[in-house]
Image (tube, rainbow, N blue to C red):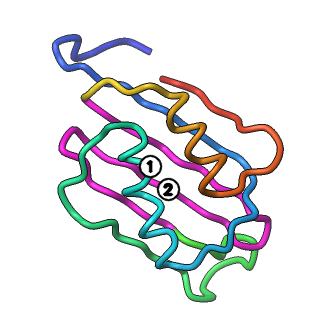
Amino acid sequence: MDDLAPEIFRQRLLVEGHYRAALDAAAVEGFLPGLARAMKLTPYGQAVVHAPGGRGQEINQGFDAFLPLVDSGIAAYFWSGPGFFSIVVYSCAPFVPQAALDFCREALDAQGPLAWKEF
């Protein structure tokens, strides 16, 4: 990927895996600030959580969430049926990816391997 703005520091991380934690909207809302703390990133607002409420395909039921950070944001997606999550961290401040992996594994009771990529 070409770096079209080398003067702007950007670090991105995608983490995916399967979870066993019991998640509802309140749990997702609490998870995101915890992830930000673990990564030493600073939120400047509350997490916003949405659920399709039965609309769309059954497999896609779950939660979509976003937490604004001083230096960008965290978007998270949780599929309730298969117990699958996909999280994207976009930051203009440096972070340690292992902190995110460790937090996700613990907080979500992640089972099996986590797939992750920095980009």
Residue 49 coordinates in the image, percent (x, y): 42, 72
The residue labelled by disc 1 is 35
- How far separated are the C-alphas under marks 2 and 1? 11 Å
Considering only vertical position in the picture, is 29 above or below 1?
A: below
x 26%, y 54%: residue: 68
Q: Which mark is residue 98?
A: none
x 55%, y 45%: residue: 103
Front of the two marks 2 and 1: 1
Q: Secondary structure at mark 1?
A: helix
Q: How many marks?
A: 2
Quadrant where the N terminus sits is top left
Label 1 crowd bin: few (<14), some (14–19), many (20+), radius 10 Å: many
Q: Earlier in the sequence, mark 2 or mark 1?
A: 1
Q: Do labels 2 and 1 touch, CB within 8 Å? A: yes
| Residue 88 is covered by the magenta coloring | yes
| Residue 104 is covered by the magenta coloring | no
Which quadrant would residue 62 be assigned to in this image?
bottom right
Residue 101 coordinates in the image, percent (x, y): 59, 37
Q: Label 1 amino acid?
A: Leu
Can you name the residue that lies furthest to the right here? Answer: 112
Considering only vertical position in the picture, is 72 above or below 57?
A: above
* Residue 110 appears left or right of 70: right
Looking at the rendering, the stretch of residues picked out in magenta corresponds to 64-92
* Residue 27 appears left or right of 75: right
x 65%, y 44%: residue: 16
The residue labelled by disc 2 is 76
Residue 14 coordinates in the image, percent (x, y): 54, 37
Considering only vertical position in the picture, is 91 above or below 6?
A: below
> Which secondary structure type mostly characterizes the magenta part of the structure?
strand
Q: Label 2 amino acid?
A: Ala
- Residue situated in front as seen by the camera: 98 or 3: 98
Residue 87 coordinates in the image, percent (x, y): 53, 48
